[in-house]
Amino acid sequence: MSNTAAIIGGGVIGGGWAARFALNGWNVRVFDPDPEAERKIAEVMSNARRSLPGLTDVALPEAGEISFHDSIQEAVEGASWIQESVPERLDIKHKTFGAIQQACDPDAVIGSSTSGFKPSQLQTGMARPDQIMVAHPFNPVYLLPLVELVPAEGFDGPLIDRAKEILASLGMYALHLKKEIDAHVADRFLEAVWREALWLVKDGIATTEEIDNAIRYGFGIRWAQMGLFETYRVAGGEAGMKHFMAQFGPCLSWPWTKLMDVPEFTDELVDLIAGQSDEQSGHHSIRDLERIRDNNLVTMMRGLKTQDWGAGALLNAQEKIMRAGSDMGAQADDLSADKPVLTAHRTVPLDWTDYNGHMTESRYLHAFADATDRFMEIIGCDAAYISSGGSYFTAETHIRHLDEVHAGTVITITTQVVEGAGKKMHLFHEMRDGERLLATGEHFLLHVSLETRKPSSPSPVIEAALVRFAKGHGALPKPDGLGRAIGAPR
Amino acid sequence: MSNTAAIIGGGVIGGGWAARFALNGWNVRVFDPDPEAERKIAEVMSNARRSLPGLTDVALPEAGEISFHDSIQEAVEGASWIQESVPERLDIKHKTFGAIQQACDPDAVIGSSTSGFKPSQLQTGMARPDQIMVAHPFNPVYLLPLVELVPAEGFDGPLIDRAKEILASLGMYALHLKKEIDAHVADRFLEAVWREALWLVKDGIATTEEIDNAIRYGFGIRWAQMGLFETYRVAGGEAGMKHFMAQFGPCLSWPWTKLMDVPEFTDELVDLIAGQSDEQSGHHSIRDLERIRDNNLVTMMRGLKTQDWGAGALLNAQEKIMRAGSDMGAQADDLSADKPVLTAHRTVPLDWTDYNGHMTESRYLHAFADATDRFMEIIGCDAAYISSGGSYFTAETHIRHLDEVHAGTVITITTQVVEGAGKKMHLFHEMRDGERLLATGEHFLLHVSLETRKPSSPSPVIEAALVRFAKGHGALPKPDGLGRAIGAPR
């Protein structure tokens, strides 16, 4: 039942695609003549495994299998997405697409990771040109959502919709460009900045480290969430975008940048930059830097997720798709009251752990609180009900930390209703890694009016659902640790 | 004893400086002939008050006073930092600096917020040219740490050191440029990207929203933490920066960008962009967008703080400065064992709250866990001791949520030792907003060996310090709620 993706060319980019597909449950078939390809992809996979699964608050499906193949023909067989990430030479790309189209499903998407070529250039001389489109991702492909999707100009068939749908299910964002252009959109910006940066280093105005600091302490962190135009819209204030442009537009013709000119790419310039870069970052290995980068990206993206904004809003959208098809989407009536309810099935994310990779103390309560929210949703106390003015507030919590858990571990929480009637809801959560009990969380909540912030009765529908679970769970054995006080004999 | 800053010109940038200084305990004297200045600065202050104080985990000092003055001379009197943020016209700037230097302390820093002028241009004809330097901040000035600090070429006196020290104490990063250049560093990048973006919109390749998405879902979030060169260093992999440049360098002369040319700034282009921007963001007011932006920035910066990286590492550095001079820096021997110990004095940050601004459930435990860490540090279980292989792990926690608290509230936590001997540490925390009790946290911890992850004895020094507090606190009344079990009668 799994989908299959074919990865043609398995470097950092191809490996990133392989990881993104495999961790989202796709079987992945790789072709790369490089004898090192298997090792390289395993390295990308190891980075991806530690960072991607915890991005969302729902566990990813079981990972697909990655297999290696001796020919393009064999790799593309049965694949519904074929991703080309071979070197940036048009002759190599043409040869690759020719081989792909000889063997692949005519309805499969053929995406190219090219950062520079236009789709019309890629399609020249191909049997089914429209099947080939630019699908340009950004490193690390397993974390960053952007994919520039550029089909042939004027082509807008169901294959495009399918490509977008698949990318969304992988947690990616298809930036669908309707006009083709050299280097698409994002790399044009990168190129402009890179060119300017080379001048600044060459002229001794700033070092590589100073330039990085100028970016990450200033506009970089601004752009990470709003991009360029929305940032300027805010800067323009109430007077609006036109006012902002009137103010800022004229600067364009000032002699601020050296961009009219291209710095000569001498050995001296290369040495200067490589030397400064060593001084700036040489005390970290590349593997360390990759992990630091991924920790930072996961932390910022999950932060934006709580704000439901930017890359974080994309994660919430992906989660909705994932919930719809999982046990995390069930409603009260679908669930038996004869056993504790599954209220969490998620992966411990990187931003929940200390530098040793252990989940930090307060994240146990975070996970239990999310499980409580999920249980509330099950009994009907969902976003719509809460916005109508009622909710449950936690009055008291008791947590027993029984065992440790690392980033990347899939945990489940099951919830038993100890008491549920009127305003009261008394829950007992058990957090597990497989059979291993990690922690218990006992919570006493009261239903409140969000207007008065005082206890009030829940809706009859919610109370009925809660009572059904309380009654069913009342027949279950009393869980170990229930009602324990700290300092009481064990 | 407070320091005084003078703010000359009180728009969005001047207001941002005023807020940054005032919230860090400086008295601020404003001169701006605009009759709306007081209202405008109050608006910036209101945004700054909700976002800045919670950035660090230590409360800021008491805010300074902002006063408004009728003349530059009156405003600059007694100020040790004078910040000019008047319109970008050299004649106006010269007039302003002339008036400032007539009345100010010759040892005061005079910073200019200019985004384009070089210091030599600003200094022309001034009485004490070296006193004037570019100090170019980034909007929102109260949150973003970057300041481009550009003194006259060759000038490197103690005034520069003083300026850097003051900026660091405000949580800012001085990018000290030793060569002057039009538009400094960061704005040259902004200009290059802006120019390219205008072309893309004008040519109908992408809309403002698509461009913003291309930035924030891809390189924007990458740059927010590592900037340009470190990102490329990672992309280059083990082969190193030279390899990366050999691969990517030649693209520079490809015809990827339109940057050799300047788009004509017609009304049509302005309308096109303003129209697309309305479509993209028009459903949010500017005030909403400012708050969304600040929520996002705070969330990402605090995320990076947990990773001790980029803008987050700057926050940790600022916190160290703040702790050194506060009650949060005291050691065991300085503290009386006759009363509960102050273990937290902090502001509830934006990223700890729900969309209504109430602190979320798990952040109560976060605050208590930080208070436990602080208490451990006080008794000698600090970073050095932990890296030697011992620490305390929490086995059991009981929290009572007694009252709600909003973002921006300064909270304190006091800690009473219930039991402390051998491997055991039993703490009772009380969290307050002033006198108002918000929550209690009862925690039972065991000292462990980080190697075996099993209980072990603490060092004699730690045990002695713990026993001293246990003994002293044993004479205090038993706190309300101690030893409570959920479900027990109240």
Image: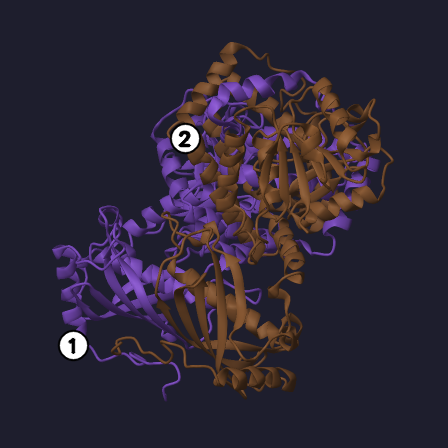
Chain colours: A brown, B purple
Q: Residue at x 51, y 36 (%)?
A: A42
Which label sits on residue B475?
1
Relative vertical location of residue A146 with respect to residue B134 in this rendering, above or below: below
| Residue closest to the eye, A438 or B458 | A438
Q: Which residue is mark 2?
A: A285
Q: Residue at x 79, y 46 (%)?
A: A161
Per the model, the C-alpha gap separating discs 2 and 1 is 54 Å
Residue B14 percent location from the top left of the image: 54, 45
Quadrant location of the C terminus of chain A? Answer: bottom left
Which amino acid does the dot numbered 1 rest on?
Ala
Tell me if I can see residue A207 in this picture: no
Q: Are marks 2 and 1 in contact (CB under 8 Å)?
A: no
Q: Tag 2's secondary structure?
A: loop
> Residue B444 lies in what quarter of the image?
bottom left
Which amino acid does the dot numbered 2 rest on?
Ser
Task: Judge from the rendering whether residue A16 lies leftward or rightward of residue A404; answer left or right.
Answer: right
